[in-house]
Image (cartoon, helix red, strand yellow):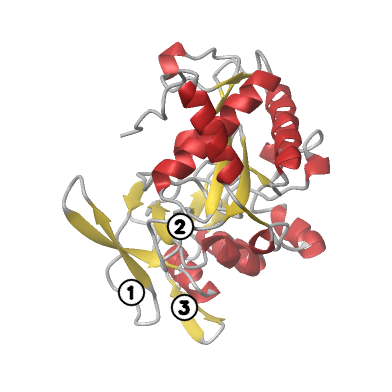
Amino acid sequence: MAKASSPAVELEVGEHTVRISNPDRVYFPARGETKLDLVNYYLSVGDGIVNALRERPTMLHRYPEGVAGEKVHQKRIPNGAPPWMETVRIFFPRYNRTADEVCVTQLAQVIWAVQMSTVEFHPWNSRRADVEKPDEWRIDLDPGDACDFATVRRVAHAVHEVLDELGATGFPKTSGGKGLHIYVRVKPDHGFDDVRRAALAFAREVERRAAGDVTTTWWRKDRDPAAVFVDYNQNARDHTIAAAYSVRGNPEATVSTPIRWDEIDAVSPRDLTIATVPARYAELGDLHAGIDDAVFDLTPLLEWAERDERDGAEAPVDPD
């Protein structure tokens, strides 16, 4: 016999009412958190998740039966959206198609997406004012299969050192998995190709300084599995990673959590979950709140890219 659905609940979120169906459905089997627990988590970090998604085309990772079930990668806004949901139209040249992607400006829109079984939010690194000009440079520290987190920490410190020398302010966060991300706000003056070239030039400099700990080799089969791949291609068009404060679709409900630089050596990413991050957020607030006030000009990195290419370095590999 099928289990009866739990009664829906209605929540007032800002100016809107969001109806949450099946609030008791278990989404995270490791500890038993439900759909309503997920909603309450996002409410607890409301300013932070909206700041991370604001006016960005956003792909939704939906889990209609919880994270143990099928994952749906949703570019188009789900059917049945209320009139106050906002979108931005994206053109995909490869398929000669468009998609109206969710574009968050307020918390109710996040909660409606969660009602539609969204667990993870994956925003573009550009905003709807000009989706072809990124304003966020993303440094993704992706450890290989044989790489421990101590190595990720060492590489993060090398990243911090190079950013400081450039006069750039990096905003770190856990990935919610095994790695770390560092975001830098940039002027939206360049297209995706130039941002990728700048990101690769930066990655090569970190590779030079953290010899043995870092690889910039694109093809996985050619990488040292004990090294950290600095994934410059996360800055490619339509490549997205989980937003700050996004929950990840794993049984433990880990969160991609902003951290301070002085926490790098102590943080344990698996401890940052929907059960623990709300109290942390209540104490510290949004650690990425100042990112829009710390804008970096990519010109020095583009000069590094030109230097490297003159010296025979290859341009970024097309990830598609």
Q: Residues within 10 Å of mark 3 (few under 14, many from 20)?
A: some
Q: Secondary structure at mark 1?
A: loop
| Observer-nearest of 34 and 164 | 164
Looking at the image, is mark 3 or mark 1 earlier in the sequence?
A: 3
Image vertical order of residue 5 relative to residue 17, above or below: above
Q: Whole-Å distance between the Cαs marked 3 and 1?
A: 11 Å
Give the numbered dot on residue 81: 1
Amino acid type, residue under disc 2 in the picture: Ser
Residue 149: percent from left, percent from top: 69, 26
Tag 2: Cα neighbours inside 10 Å, few (<14), some, or many (≥20)? many
| Residue at the left extreme of this rendering | 96
Find the distance from the CA under tag 3 to the CA under tag 2. 28 Å
Between marks 3 and 2 in the image, the one whose residue lies nearer the viewer = 2
**Residue assigned mark 2:** 126
Q: Amino acid at mark 3?
A: Val
Which residue is nearer to you in this view: 42 or 226? 226
Q: Amino acid at mark 1?
A: Ala
> Residue 18's mark?
3
Judge whether 77 appears above or below 231 on screen: below
Residue 155 lies, in percent from the top left, at 69, 27
Q: At 55% from the left edge and 65% from the top edge, which residue is drawn?
A: 39
**Quarter occupied by the N terminus:** bottom left
Residue at 78% x, 47% y: name it: 260
Q: Earlier in the sequence, mark 2 or mark 1?
A: 1
> Is residue 252 in view?
no
* Image quadrant where residue 56 sits: bottom left
